[in-house]
Each structure stands twice: as C-alpha cells, then as structure tokens.
Amino acid sequence: MTVIISGYFDFEDHEDVPSILQAATPLIAGALAETGCIAYAWTQDHTVHNRVWVYEEWTSSETLADHLNSHWYRDMGAHLRKFARKPQAKPIKKFRIDHEEPVYDETGTARADFFT
C-alpha cells in the first residue's frame, strides 16, 4: 500500500532556504535511489519564502521504515538541525493510500469523485 508523507518546515531566515536545499541535493538524490522511493521532493514555497515543503511517496510502510532507519534520513536531520526553525505549526503527516485514480477521466474532465 502506497504511503505519502506531506508537510512543511518554516525556517527563521528565508535567505537560508536556497542554500539549505542546495546542500541537501545529495541527500535527496540518495533517498530517491532507495528501494521503494517513488518521490522525494523538498521545495521552497513560492509565497511563504521561509517555508520548505516535503513530499515523499513510498511503495509501502516497509520501504518507508527502511528509509527512516537509513543514513539518508539521519543525515538529512543532521543537516536541517544546522539551521534555526520556527516551532512546527502543523505536524508532517503520513497517509496510507488504499485507492488511487487519475484526476482526469478518459474524456479529459477533472473529477473529484472516484469513478471505479
């Protein structure tokens, strides 16, 4: 069952964010190369400039567990601790996906309902 991680961090100084992300590039690449990693994206918010969004997608809880026990995860945590962050306003969440469908149906229409 696919697992998605989604949330954000707010750093004290928005001017740090580009260098934070640039220095994290090898750590992101390492996580992307892990077995079971479908997506692993860290991006600066385009309107809240001190905010970094995290989006991860894993093939299973087991592959996420492997990541959480990897040096890539520990190294990213050590990297992020070098920079002042604001208190976490909302928790970063994980979601189990038991059903997924494309947003657009076969006619190209965006749909909010599930059609299968």
Image (cartoon, rainbow, N blue to C red):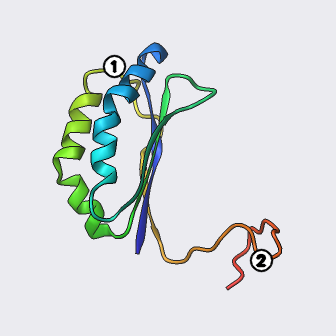
Amino acid residing under circle 1: Ala
Residue at the (27%, 47%) spot, across then down: 30
Q: Is residue 59 left or right of residue 63?
A: right
Instruction: Look at the image and tell me in which quarter the N terminus lies.
Output: bottom left
The secondary element bearing badge 1 is classed as: loop
Q: At which x and y percent is residue 103?
A: 70, 66
Badge 2 is on which residue? 106
Q: Could you tell me which residue is drawn at 42 percent across and 46 percent down?
A: 92
Residue 18 sits in quarter: top left
> Which structural element holds mark 2?
loop
Q: Nearer the viewer, residue 37 or 81?
A: 37
Residue that numbered label 1 is attached to: 84
User: Which label's residue is closer to the chain start, 2 or 1?
Assistant: 1
Residue 61 on image: x %, y %: 31, 68
Question: 66 or 96: which is nearer to us?
Answer: 66
Within-10-Å neighbours for mark 1: few <14, some 14–19, many 20+: few
Q: Residue furthest bottom?
A: 116
Residue 50 image position (x, y, % from top left):
50, 23
Locate residue 35: give its quadrant.
Answer: bottom left
Give residue 39's mark: none
Q: Is residue 109 above or below residue 45?
A: below
Q: Is residue 80 above or below residue 106?
A: above
Question: Which circle, 2 or 1, is nearer the viewer?
Answer: 2
Quarter holding the C terminus is bottom right
Q: Amino acid at mark 2?
A: Glu
